Image (spheres, helix red, strand yellow):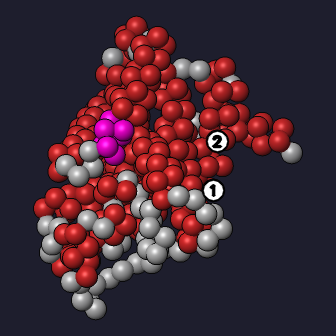
Amino acid sequence: MPMQEPQRRLLGPFNSTRTGVPHLELSANQTGPWCLHVSIPDGLFLSLGLVSLVENVLVVISIAKNQNLHSPMYYFICCLALSDLLVSVSIVLETTLILVLEAGALATRVTVVQQLDNVIDVLICGSMVSSLCFLGAIAVDRYISIFYALRYHSIVTLPRTRWAIVAIWVASISSSTLFVAYYNHTAVLLCLVTFFLATLALMVVLYVHMLARAHQHAQAIAQLHKRQHLVHQGFRLKGAATLTILLGIFFLCWGPFFLYLTLIVLCPKHPTCGCFFKNLNLFLALIIFNSIVDPLIYAFRSQELRMTLKEVLLCSW
């Protein structure tokens, strides 16, 4: 974690400007004045991280407090909040460490700093992988609740949910450790990008299918009430808007970072790609922003959870 470089080192292996990987450093130097570089102040990183921390901690406390929320769906939402919390905390922790080292307030050996940075990288990578996994798990849970409603409680049982959660956390930590240990292999980047694309494809297929089923249900209700045209039009607009927001935010917040990883493999020496590499901080800020938005999409839409959250806030005062 070199102190002279202002750009933070996420997944140290993957951030060329901080690890000094020759081919990526060359591509960054070849960029001209036309290159767009969006500067993200450290204060903004810290502010976003703190907001995400408070928001996701409230989600976890609310679910833990209310026994009515101890169901498979809310367990997945709680784990998503934990993952988002770890993403934000890890990036904020790394940002703080960089600022402290740059200010000369912490004097320690390079090997100690490197080991600490590796631990932070494992936390960041693992929390990202687990966050994507739980987003997919929530989509699968909702799909089963709609298409197998009568068998839902026999399919998605609490023991199975707990085993799935444990498996996701173990797989996330194990894979992130391997990713950081073997960062210089192209296969590592390709695995991460493939995993993101698979998660995106899964969410698109499941949510589009759920939207189609809900449309059929609305059509049947409209025929019964003889208000088919108005109901169809209103449902299509509402359903399309909800689906666009859900998938759009996911793609816009996560897509640039995984495009960054893809370009490292495809065009590490091209000036245009080098220009893209300079905006890593922006892509990390988008990921933290996603951890702020996730509770609004998946948690706070629940009236039961909102009521519990209100009780938690009132008790804290």
In the depicted structure, whether residue 19 falls above or below residue 82: below
Viewer can see residue 149: yes
Q: Does residue 239 show up magenta in the picture? A: no
Q: Which residue lies furthest to the top in this view?
A: 154
Task: Specify whether 181 is left or right of 73.
Answer: left
Residue positioned 43% across, 74% down in the render? 5
Camera-side residue: 204 or 134?
134
Q: Quadrant of the C terminus?
A: top right
Residue 176: in magenta span: yes
Q: Give amino acid for label 2.
A: Val
Type of amino acid at the residue the image marks with label 1:
Leu
Which quadrant would residue 179 be assigned to in this image? top left
Residue 57 has which mark? 2
Label 2 sits on a secondary structure element that is helix
Which numbered dot is residue 50?
A: 1
Range of magenta residues: 175-181
Above or below residue 287? Residue 306 is above
Q: Which residue is drawn at 37% across and 53% down?
A: 11
